[in-house]
Amino acid sequence: VSTQSTGRQLHAMAHSSQAYPLSHHSRAITKNTTMDRAAISPFRQQTNHLAPSMRPVEHVDAALRSAQKFHDVDPSWNLDRELVTLERRPYAASLLDCAEKAARSAGKLIRDAYADDKPEYDTKLNATDPVTETDRRCEDVVIETIRSRFSGHDFMGEESAQGNLREALTDDPTWIIDPIDGTSNFVHHLPGVSVSIACYVCKQPVAACVYFPLSDEMFSATIGGGAYLNGGRIRTSACESLRTACVATEVGYDRSEDGVAQQVARLGNLMMSGQVQAVRMTGGCCNNLCSIACGRMDAYYEGRDATYGPKPWDWAASSLILKEAGGWIGSFAGGELDIFSGCGVATAGEPLRDELLPLLK
């Protein structure tokens, strides 16, 4: 193509309604010009997971508003809402920024509540499963904050979720929220209380944060971007033996004869056969998993079934944080974690997993 002909084509394209060239021919003639698609694509500014002050949030939000949907979404899916692939790190950073803002807003309500007398509470499953007005207010604040930025997304919150939770989680972006993880700690004014928020896309976690308002600790992670505590990279411990491990568990809500017997048997195996160094109960699934993620503890197990064990909002955010920190999390049988099963095991690494799992059968 002659230089004169190319110039005419570029001039015509510049005055057309097309945002940037799509055909192979158009891409070829615009290479290294101001209309080069590689240079002007709103998603060219890729990034790994960065410290909060370095995330290009404004850039990503502008790209989302202008793009409507991501370019690699198959139009035949006929989705009404944006759907993104998991490798879209800028989008994950934008989701995480929104989650952190929502968690901090809810955290302020929790801190304020600790300044008052012990709160009144209702119960849900049984007397061991309390819920307070602060739980409900925190969930409302979280949902309002996220919805103001991502209005088309779905939500699954502990205080508002109903029906079959497994069926409620679709491929659409869905925020899974625990407004207060460790409500029993909260009603007794004990520490170890957190706000847990995760965004799932295609039924997989993309961005997650767990915020502990009393200690002002923000744990966060994005898919493939690593795990962080207050902006600093975290990793699990190098512990490979129960004899040097600190293992966490929780008694949960099950007070049946079979349920209590199972808990006692597992704990006995851990102490006698495993000769574990230390056992702790912090009162919160998120607290335990985040403690493993940053190396404070080394393993955690809990659960009997979907009724009495941890719920999806207990696992959703902290499981991503743990995995991005290098830890292992899965089922009692050693398979993938099912956040709807009510059962799970987490360890700092696979050697410790291989020693722990046989003791929990």
Image: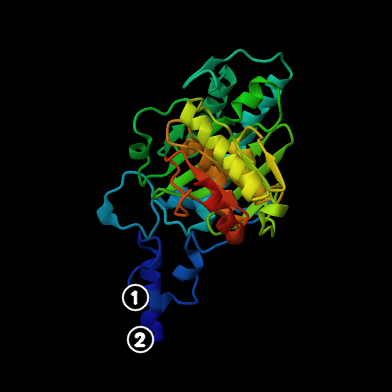
Sequence-first tag of 2 and 1: 2
Tell me: 286 left or right of 44: right
Residue shown at 37%/45% (left/top)?
172
Whether residue 106 is visible to the viewer of this picture, yes or no, is yes
Q: Nearer the viewer, mark 2 or mark 1?
A: 1
Q: Which quarter of the figure has residue 241?
A: bottom right
Compared with 154, 86 (above or below) is below
Residue type (three-letter) at the residue carrying disc 2: Val
Compared with 119, 270 (above or below) is below
Residue 24, labelled with which disc? 1
Q: Tag 2's secondary structure? A: loop
Residue 234, labelled with which disc? none
Residue shown at 74%/19% (left/top)?
115
Colouring? rainbow
Q: Return the x and y of residue 211 as percentages of the image width and height.
A: 64, 38
Compare residues 335 and 10 and report the one nearer the observer: 335
Residue type (three-letter) at the residue carrying disc 1: His
Q: Return the x and y of residue 74 as percentages of the image width and height.
A: 31, 58
Q: Return the x and y of residue 37 as percentages of the image width and height.
A: 44, 68
Compare residues 336 and 259 and report the one nearer the observer: 259
Among all residues in the image, which is located at the extreme front? 272
Compare residues 96 and 303 and report the one nearer the observer: 303
* Residue on which disc 2 sits: 1
Compare residues 253 and 165 and report the one nearer the observer: 253
